[in-house]
Amino acid sequence: MKNTLIALSLAAFAAAASAQATPAGLWKTIDDETKTEKSLVRVTDNGGIFSGKIEKLMDPAKANAVCEKCSDERKDQAIMGMTIIRAVKHNPDDAELWDGGDILDPNNGKVYKVRLKPVDGGKKLEVRGYIGAPLFGRTQTWIRVE
């Protein structure tokens, strides 16, 4: 009986941990170069396809900023409320990764392939933007807010 209770407790804990180990949630973005907080991005799961939208910019001076350097339909659109992560799906070959979509850097208007990896039990999110292969890119670590 005691072993059964321990096994059930471990299974419940594992299920709770895996529920948090997803990119869905509200994340504080941290600039990988300056280490400053930049924004809050909400990543949502829409039937297995993840997207991320900027909910808040930390710099009040940029509250009304637009993406002047964007070259797609987001050109000259407000950065606040902008979808910057699109079409990301769970990687069937690696249970810890979500990829296949893209991410926009509103600072330079460039769109990169993206790979998302929840780490530290889902408390952090490694966001890797790259061109071609993940080897050629950069990683930011975002902090879960909720």
Image (cartoon, helix red, strand yellow):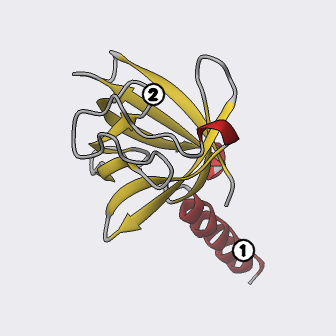
Q: Position of residue 137 (x, y in %)?
A: 38, 19
Q: Give the CA separation, mark 1 to mark 2.
A: 55 Å
* Residue 76 appears anywhere in the view: yes
Residue underneath mark 1: 3
> What x and y, as percent, mark residue 83?
38, 52
Q: Which residue corresponds to the image point at 44% horizontal and 63% vertical from the top-left?
A: 44
* Image vertical order of residue 133 relative to residue 94, above or below: above
Residue 7, by quadrant, is bottom right
Q: Secondary structure at mark 2?
A: loop
Residue 59 visible:
no
Q: Which mark is residue 17?
A: none
Q: Nearer the viewer, mark 1 or mark 2?
A: 2
- Neighbor class of circle 1 (other Cα within 10 Å; few <14, some 14-19, many 20+) is few
Do labels 1 and 2 touch, CB within 8 Å?
no
Q: Is residue 14 above or below residue 73?
A: below
Residue 66 point in image, percent of width and height: 43, 40
Horizontal relation, residue 107 to residue 46: left or right: right
**Foreground residue among 58 and 130:** 58
* Image quadrant in which the N terminus is located: bottom right
Residue 65 at x, y percent in the picture: 50, 40
- Residue at the (55%, 55%) spot, across then down: 21
Please state if 37 lies on the left or on the right of 21 as rendered: right
* Quarter holding residue 120: top right
Q: Callout 1, which amino acid?
A: Asn
Q: Which residue is mark 2?
A: 107
Instruction: Tell me if residue 69 comes above or below residue 6 in the rendering.
Output: above
Q: Secondary structure at mark 1?
A: helix
- Decide which of tag 1 and tag 2 comes sooner along the chain: 1
